[in-house]
Amino acid sequence: MKKREKIYAFIDSQNLNLGVRSQGWILDWRKFRQYLRNKYNITNTYLFIGYKPGNESLYTHLQQMGYLLILKPTMELPDKSVKGNVDAELVLHTMIQYKNYNKAIIVSGDGDFFCLVEYLENKNKLLHILTPNKQYSKLFKKYSSFVIRVDQLRGSLEYKKTGIGGRSKP
């Protein structure tokens, strides 16, 4: 009997979140984690997210859903927006975990991950690139056979607020 492959997902949370919101909907993070588990039998799901004091309950909630959080310190910019770029952390942790998985799913449409995607594909370790929408980097055109667009899964992954006693917004 063949040993089951270990598949890890590495998620650029801001790219995914902002990418689906730009399409007019909100991702249900619980459904997304279940999708990854059910569709790809993901062993570990790393979620790279900027750390903001006061968001601890969000981080705990995401961990309870099964995400392994990698928190990046953020900076407040002069216009009061928050910057917490996680690209280096995602690449670093993908390589730290390299020997522990057979295949990886990179969740981002950001061309900054081109070198990582190229490396993983050359080593036969790339399973998919999940992009938030059709506006992903043109650098990934060479890897279009690996691309799955999350916006095309909106029907099953969209957050829908339920009535009394239902879940609160993630």
Image (cartoon, rainbow, N blue to C red):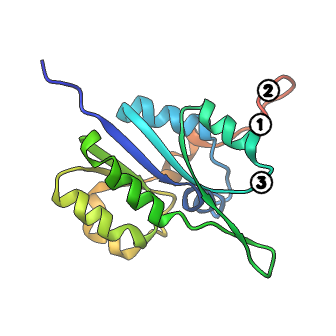
Name the foreground residue: 169 vs 71: 71
Decide: marks 3, 2 in contact (CB < 8 A)?
Answer: no
The residue singled out by tag 3 in the image is 53
- Quadrant in the picture for the C terminus: top right
Three-letter amino acid code at the position of disc 2: Gly
Residue picked out by circle 2: 166
**How many numbered discs sit on the rendered protein?**
3
Q: Residues within 10 Å of mark 1 (few under 14, many from 20)?
A: few
Distance between the alpha carbons at the discs numbered 1 and 3: 26 Å
The furthest residue to the right: 164
For the residue pair 18 and 124, the one nearer the viewer reads as 124
Q: Residue at x 33, y 46 (%)?
A: 97
Residue 57 against residue 166 in the figure, above or below: below
**Residue 119 or 154: which is nearer the viewer?**
119
SS of the residue under disc 3: loop
Q: Nearer the viewer, residue 40 or 42?
A: 42
Q: Is residue 86 left or right of residue 112?
A: right
Q: Is residue 103 visible?
A: yes
Find disc 1 in the rendering and name its residue: 161
Residue 62 lies, in percent from the top left, at 63, 38
Q: Which of marks 1 and 3 is in front?
A: 3
Q: What residue type is labelled 1?
A: Lys
**Location of residue 99 by image quarter:** top left
**For the point 34% across and 75% down, which residue is it?**
139
Residues under numbered marks 1 and 3 in contact, where contact means CB atoms less than 8 Å apart = no
Q: In this view, does 151 lie above or below 44?
A: below
Question: Circle 1 — which element?
Answer: loop
Q: Residue furthest bottom?
A: 78
Name the residue: 38% across, 67% down: 113
